[in-house]
Amino acid sequence: MDFHLDTLLNFPNATVEQCIQEAGEIFLTLRLLNDAADCPNCGHSTEELHQSRPVLLRDLSIFGQATHLKIPRRQFYCRACQRYFTESLPYVDKGRQYTCRYEEYIYQQVQLTTIEQVSRMEGLTYDRVEGIFNHQYEFKKKRVGLERNESQLMKSVTGKDSETLPPLSETLRLDDSWR
Ligand SMILES: [Zn+2]
């Protein structure tokens, strides 16, 4: 729709078809530009679209207004392995209701302030903010673990440990002290 909006959105193979402002919130309807998707089982590229249903994802606010993206979640059929699969999108983790960059933002904000404060600022429930924080924490822990395995050789050479995360209990205690 709008070149500038697409540039700001900064997602591959996606264009903004509609932009609605409603009660101080922004809703962007996206259209995906790729016709094919790669099967996660065998890597075969397929254009056989089985079904598409829109999902609403929370994204970073635009000009201080809460922003939601309406994105088609598409299911394709792979003829090679005769299976259906849901297309994976690089900007949202499987089964999440938020974009990766929004979850990353919430994770950082919680560390700077408190879950309550982030909950108020973002208009999300306490449980949702906590859920995002824990999801990101687990994700980072896994990544640090992987990096540590990869850097075992380096470690023995340099004698230095790779980046570590504080224990979750400590991070949450930090949160408690601000209550
Ligand atoms: Zn396949």
Image: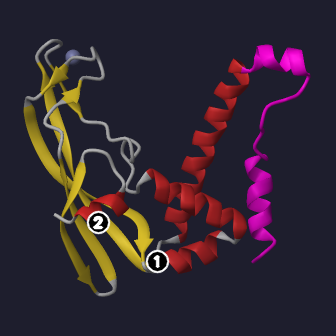
* Beta carbon at label 1 within 8 Å of ligand 1: no
Kind of residue at badge 2: Leu
Q: Is residue 159 magenta?
A: yes
Q: Viewed as shown, does residue 111 lie left or right of 161? A: left
Q: Which residues are magenta?
A: 151-179
Is residue 130 visible to the viewer in this orientation of the structure?
no
In percent of the image, x 31 and y 37: which residue is there? 88
Indicate the amino acid at tag 1. Answer: Gly
Q: State which mark lies toward you, 2 or 1.
A: 2
At x 29%, y 66%, the residue is: 4
Vertical arrangement, residue 119 with respect to residue 9, above or below = below
Q: In the figure, is residue 50 to the left or right of 128?
A: left
Tell which quarter ligand 1 is in.
top left
Numbered circle sitting on residue 5: 2
The answer to whether 19 is drawn above or below residue 37 in the figure is below
Q: In the rendered image of this protein, does residue 37 appear above or below residue 79?
A: below
Q: Which mark is residue 123?
A: 1
Tell me what residue is drawn at x 65 percent, y 65 percent: 110
Pointer 2: residues within 10 angstroms few (<14), some, or many (20+)? Answer: some
The reply to whether callout 2 and callout 1 are in contact (CB within 8 Å) is no
Alpha carbons under labels 2 and 1: distance apart: 24 Å
Q: Is residue 120 left or right of residue 96?
A: right
Q: Is mark 2 within 8 Å of ligand 1?
A: no
